[in-house]
Image (cartoon, rainbow, N blue to C red):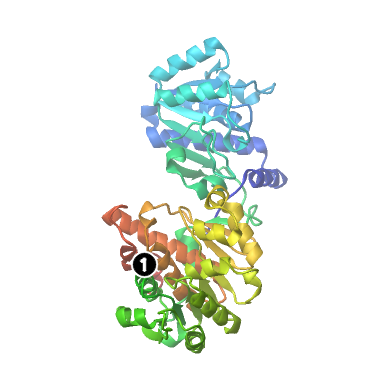
């Protein structure tokens, strides 16, 4: 199985050093990259015959990205295109890639001079394509003159843009984009996808993304700890289903949540859990909620939790029922729709202090809000656990603002996993899954149809059911749940549209991933 590693700029440089040590020179990588980009440009826009006579402008930076651009220009010229390379900064001398490009009849223009800027403006008026080979992964400071004027000219021209490795202005590590940068219609990443863009996942900046093979030897990425989730990787995590299996061997999950006010959350968690492949699904919910939702999902087994005269959970009695049921379960989901009143807080405290330390937990929604107000809560129970916060809940857990979470999604998620000693799922576009051992997985799914009430409940239920089947594989089951959830949501989006789709539509499609990627193994 091939994995899709995500790299930072520093990691990419380290891999290049390892390539040299393995006998593949930087010049060979550069030549491979330039040819791969040229072939992709040709195949994306025209076939070999249609390329003849096309006018292409390549924006050239001072470093290796610019050198790659010269290699691209050399090949495109050889195939009949009219290529103009525009410099925005002085390049080192000697410059063998520039010399080879000029010998191949690539026209080189100094875009920093008045005459060069005028020449660029004229070229853009009749150009068919712009190739951005300015900075690549080298962006580390704000864009200023003369580059900002050159990029603005390119943007104003409305000529299609292909970015070589990364659009200029896009940070490879954080995904932040300089307002003076140049968005691309298509981004051709070299060797590996880059971490920052994958996490931010803004297609208005990168356009469609392709990953090009540039001849990096196998095995040089073995130390990388960040994966882009793919269907192959997710399928490799899927719990096995023995042909002669019965419900007793597929685990059981216990869902604890709901209240008189919040009935939908626990109902959706339950429905999603029953579609995970788990053998049994138990639900423990307060009596007022029990009277209304018990039996709504006929495959689940419901328990009523006693309440006090004020309608809140009776902490002691409710906790004992949950603890008794948990002894028959192989995973426990706590929090959806439970409420964060003092009685619920006391109930949660009793459960966490007395639960079997080996039982894996999914802590979601109100369970997280309660814990956020508890001093050093992560030191009070030893259970392996997956936390599933949205950015607001993450902010409360970490004592920072939601904006700070969103501005530093990668570092915040990793820090939380390390600090709490738990697997952490930071929900949102390009959901992140971090493990205390340093591993990080990034979801490829970006779907505003999930930005609605109930989406997180679906994920929590699915995760609880998967964890019941593989209670020792928290990071893997969290990654599988996130990918499967996103895969189902993508089908809902395609069928119903982002505006009209609901969380329940995602539940209805949770089985599609298993059908598409696992069913053949049983046929």
Q: Nearer the viewer, residue 422 or 342?
A: 342
Q: Does residue 106 appear left or right of residue 447 in this picture?
A: right
Instruction: Locate residue 125, reporting x and y percent.
Output: 39, 18
Residue placed most toward the observer, 502 or 463 = 502
The vertical placement of 259 against 426, above or below, is below
User: Would residue 136 be visible to someone looking at this image?
Assistant: yes
Circle 1 residues within 10 Å: few <14, some 14–19, many ≥20: many
The residue sitting at the front extreme is 309
Where, by quadrant of the figure, is residue 502 drawn?
Answer: bottom left
Could you say where residue 131 lies in the image, as x and y percent from the top left? 48, 29
Residue 433 appears anywhere in the view: no
- Residue at 41 percent of width and 67 percent of height: 457
Question: Left or right of 253: which side holds 133?
Answer: right
Q: Residue furthest right?
A: 21
Helix, strand or loop at label 1? It is loop
Vertical relation: 472 (above or below) 23: below
Nearer the observer, 30 or 149? 149
State the image coordinates of residue 427 (x, y, percent, origin top left): 48, 58
Q: How many marks?
A: 1
- Drawn side of residue 379 relative to residue 263, left or right: right
Q: Which residue carries the number 1 mark?
A: 510
Q: Quadrant of the C terminus?
A: bottom left
């Amino acid at each position: 199985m091939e994995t899709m590693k995500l790299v930072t700029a520093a990691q990419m440089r380290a891999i290049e050093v390892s390539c040299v040590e393995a006998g593949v020179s930087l010049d060979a990588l550069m030549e491979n990259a330039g040819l791969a980009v040229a072939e992709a440009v040709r195949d994306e826009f025209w076939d070999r015959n249609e390329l003849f006579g096309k006018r292409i402008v390549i924006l050239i930076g001072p470093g290796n990205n610019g050198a790659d651009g010269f290699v691209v220009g050399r090949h495109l010229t050889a195939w009949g295109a009219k290529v103009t390379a525009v410099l925005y900064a002085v390049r080192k001398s000697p410059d063998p890639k520039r010399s080879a490009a000029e010998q191949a009849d690539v026209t080189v223009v100094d875009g920093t001079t008045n005459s060069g800027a005028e020449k660029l403006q004229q070229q853009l008026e009749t150009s068919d394509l712009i190739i951005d080979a300015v900075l690549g992964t080298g962006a580390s400071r704000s864009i200023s003159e003369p580059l900002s004027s050159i990029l603005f000219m390119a943007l104003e021209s409305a000529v299609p843009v292909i970015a070589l490795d990364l659009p200029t202005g896009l940070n490879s590590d954080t995904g932040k984009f300089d307002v003076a940068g140049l968005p691309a219609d298509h981004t051709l990443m070299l060797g590996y996808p880059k971490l920052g863009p994958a996490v931010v996942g803004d297609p208005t900046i990168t356009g469609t993304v392709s990953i090009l093979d540039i001849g990096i030897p196998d095995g040089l990425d073995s130390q990388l700890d960040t994966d882009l989730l793919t269907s192959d990787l997710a399928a490799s995590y899927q719990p096995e289903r023995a042909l002669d299996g019965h419900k007793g061997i597929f685990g059981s999950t216990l869902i604890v949540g709901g209240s008189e006010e919040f009935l939908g959350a626990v109902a959706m968690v339950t429905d999603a859990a029953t579609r995970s492949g788990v053998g049994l699904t138990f639900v423990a919910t307060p009596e007022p909620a029990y009277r209304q939702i018990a039996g709504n999902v006929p495959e689940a087994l419901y328990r009523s939790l006693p309440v006090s005269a004020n309608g809140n959970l009776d902490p002691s009695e409710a906790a004992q029922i949950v603890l008794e049921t948990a002894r028959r379960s192989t995973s426990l989901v706590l929090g959806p729709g439970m409420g964060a009143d003092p009685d619920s807080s006391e109930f949660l405290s009793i459960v966490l202090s007395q639960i079997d330390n080996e039982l894996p937990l999914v802590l979601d929604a109100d369970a997280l809000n309660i814990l956020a107000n508890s001093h050093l809560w992560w030191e009070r129970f030893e259970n392996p656990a997956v936390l599933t916060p949205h950015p607001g809940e993450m902010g409360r857990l970490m004592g920072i603002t939601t904006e700070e979470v969103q501005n530093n999604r990668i570092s915040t998620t990793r820090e939380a996993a390390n600090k709490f000693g738990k697997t952490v799922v930071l929900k949102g576009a390009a959901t992140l899954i971090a493990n205390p051992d340093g591993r990080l997985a990034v979801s490829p799914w970006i779907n505003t149809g999930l930005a609605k009430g109930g989406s997180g409940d679906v994920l929590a239920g699915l995760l609880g059911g998967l964890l019941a089947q593989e209670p020792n594989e928290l990071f893997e089951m969290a990654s599988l749940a996130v990918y499967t959830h996103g895969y189902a949501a993508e089908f809902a989006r395609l069928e119903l549209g982002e505006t009209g789709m609901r969380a329940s539509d995602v539940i209805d499609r949770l089985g599609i991933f298993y059908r598409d990627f696992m069913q053949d193994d049983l046929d």
